[in-house]
Image: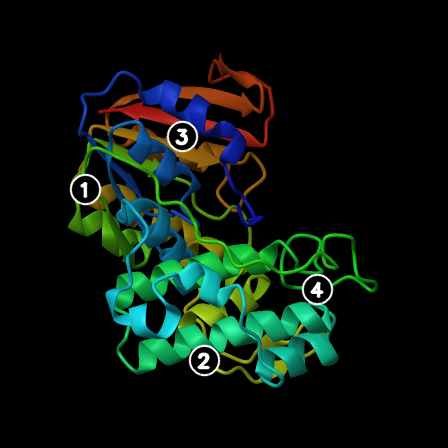
Amino acid sequence: MLRYLGSKTLLVEQINELIDPQPKGSVFCDPFGGIGTVGSYMKQKGFQVISGDLLQFAHYFQKALIQLDAPPTFPNLISETGGDVESFLNQISAQHGWLIKSYCEERSFFTQENAEHIQGCIDAIWGWKASHHIDENEYAFLIASLIQSMDRVANTAGTYYAYLKRYYRKAIQPFNFRFLHPVQGEYPCQCYLKDANTLVKQHECQILYLDPPYNTRDYAKYYHLPETIARGEVPIPTGKSGVPDRHEIRSPYIQQTKVEGAFRELLASSCCQMILFHYTDNGLLHEEFIRDTLSELGGTIEEYFFDCKGYRTSSLSSSVSSKHHVYKVTL
């Protein structure tokens, strides 16, 4: 999967252990869903998943992995692609385009050959959407698949906030367009392009999983190129990293002056039976504030410290520090 800041790929089993057992079909709400790592795992485990994010490209990953149960069949592209969209996109390229110019020739995010191939895919997918040959779900699936394929050959150390001075070994591999594989599940799931507080107000659930940003890092800038491709906007790059000058809606969870109020509001408007709050001990929200605010809900609070090998419990007075600190509130 795309290398994503804060991804919980190595911790999904431990997260599931904290809520097991739950009746099949219970609603699992993940309003800070990112690229769908936790949500897709919970779908596979038999939950109805509701997820959300503010970023368009992350929303498309969620739709592709969680909302869909199988790759689309693209009935309106049969005549153009011969019925094999994946192979068609794996063969096309473009000689000119904004990505080639700004993110290959001017900034070394991709080799020339890979940039031409990626540009060809962008032009085709954007064109199919503009001509109404694909619907929103089909577009989301293709864009998420393109971003995933593109990331495999990106000349970066993890995000798109900077590129490497020399082409790294993965960047000189040939680009291959590959479909993502939607996760199979027993129950329908829904994904939304919404801020977390709005999503929580609008949906009841059994388990509310909260994994907000921990610091002031703005994901819209760190993943500006995937976001540009998802939005279908030709960018005006600025600076060394080519970050477009866009007026983004900044999450209150990355702003020190707003995060406490946003967290209080979210909890006050939630309707659930269990809350898992996944945070770090060195984040914008301090431990004492978190405990005090969660205790106002009136439930039972347990605390867990995760590592990639498992988890263990700790008393409230413990001095143990961990990057993965989970507060479980049973209401």
Mark 2 or mark 4, whichever is nearer to me: 2
Q: Where is the C terminus found, in terms of image quarters?
A: top left
| Residue 106 seen in the current view | no
> Is residue 7 depicted above or below 57 in this figure?
above
Q: Are marks 1 and 3 in contact (CB under 8 Å)?
A: no
Q: Are marks 2 and 4 in contact (CB under 8 Å)?
A: no
How far is mark 2 from mark 4, CA to CA?
Answer: 20 Å
> Is residue 300 depicted above or below 141 in this figure?
above
Who's the residue at 40% across and 49% down the image? Answer: 260
SS at mark 4 in the image: loop
Q: Could you classify mark 3 by the number of other residues whose Cα lies within 10 Å: few (under 14), some (14-19), or many (20 or more)? A: some
Give amino acid for label 1.
Pro
Task: Please state if 81 lies on the left or on the right of 274 as rendered.
Answer: right
Instruction: Specify the quadrant of the image occupied by residue 290.
Output: top left
Give amino acid for label 3.
Arg
Q: Earlier in the sequence, mark 2 or mark 4?
A: 4
Residue 84 position, x and y percent, is 39, 61
Q: Could you classify mark 2 by the number of other residues whose Cα lies within 10 Å: few (under 14), some (14-19), or many (20 or more)? A: few
Instruction: Specify the quadrant of the image occupied by residue 198.
Output: bottom left
SS at mark 1 in the image: loop
Name the residue beneath numbered marker 4. Answer: 162
Give amino acid for label 4.
Ala
Q: Earlier in the sequence, mark 1 or mark 3?
A: 1
Q: Earlier in the sequence, mark 2 or mark 3?
A: 2
Give amino acid for label 2.
Glu
**The disc label shown at residue 188, or none:** 1
Residue 186 position, x and y percent, is 21, 33
Name the residue beneath numbered marker 3. Answer: 291
Name the residue beneath numbered marker 2. Answer: 233
